[in-house]
Amino acid sequence: MNRLLIAVSAVLLCTGVMAQPKKVSILGDSYSTFRGAIPQNYAVFYPLQGNDVKNVEETWWYQFISDSGFQLEVNNSYSGSTICNTGYNREDYSDRAFISRVNEIGSPDILFIFGGTNDAWAGSPIGEYKYRDITKADLYFFRPALAYLLDELKSLYPETKIYFLLNTELKDEINESVKTVCAHYNVPVIVLHDIDKQISHPSKEGMKAIAGQISDFIKNE
């Protein structure tokens, strides 16, 4: 009888462990924001008049997480943020840059980095590829800042599966840089395509397309 109880307990314990849904975090910009779903002091884009995404359930990340049976850990998305410390009009964005938020994503099983859009739009300096001895001054350039970001995330969250979401209609040098730096750190890049947008941001159809493309990519890995 004792052996039977032990066996049953073991099965229940294993079942409980297996039933735990994967936790997903997002490190992003305006494309991943929604009022009430991000830290209170962060700039937010959605919802906004002129874009038909009006409910949080219509965002790409909510759809993906819900459809996959996962759960949201942290959505650390700041509208207008760049990966590097150089923002619009060459302003210092070190208070909101992706590299400044690496410690604020919880303990996810999966992390989506959805960035580079504002670096492209703001004309942030690209810089050179650099993977070692990155200085504070280097972090104002896109390539070394992205390398620093991935290196920090890999170090802080060694068990987390990291994906980079690459937006459509970005500069070739941004696309090339993302693919090159991510390849160096063995981070898969999900290259998005055919995303419908309103005010340069995903519409409801665009959000649905993003969620679907992420799901298809992960299923086919």
Image (tube, rainbow, N blue to C red):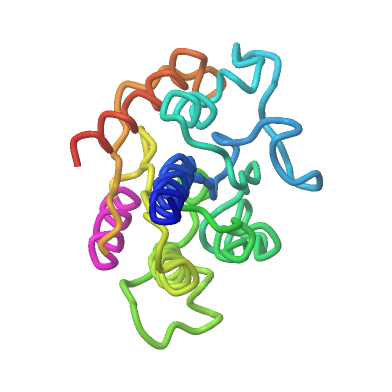
Identity of the residue drawn at 48% across and 77% down: 138
- Viewer-proximal residue among 64 and 95: 64
Based on the picture, tell me whether residue 176 belongs to the magenta stretch: yes
Rendered location of residue 145, percent (x, y): 46, 68
Rendered location of residue 160, percent (x, y): 42, 59
Rendered location of residue 206, percent (x, y): 44, 19
Identity of the residue drawn at 50% across and 57% down: 124
Identity of the residue drawn at 28% across and 46% down: 172
Whether residue 36 sits left or right of residue 19 in the image: it is right
Q: In this view, does 60 lie above or below 40?
A: above
Q: Is there any visible trace of residue 111 in the rendered image?
A: no
The residue segment tinted magenta is 173-185
Q: Is residue 178 above or below residue 24?
A: below
Whether residue 219 sits left or right of residue 122 in the image: it is left
Identity of the residue drawn at 55% across and 46% down: 28
- Viewer-proximal residue among 58 and 193: 58
Q: Which residue lies furthest to the bottom in this view?
A: 133
- Viewer-proximal residue among 57 and 12: 12
Q: In this view, does 192 lie above or below 75?
A: above
Q: Is there any visible trace of residue 166 in the rendered image?
A: yes
Q: Residue furthest front?
A: 1
Whether residue 215 sits left or right of residue 20 in the image: it is left
Rendered location of residue 114, percent (x, y): 46, 44
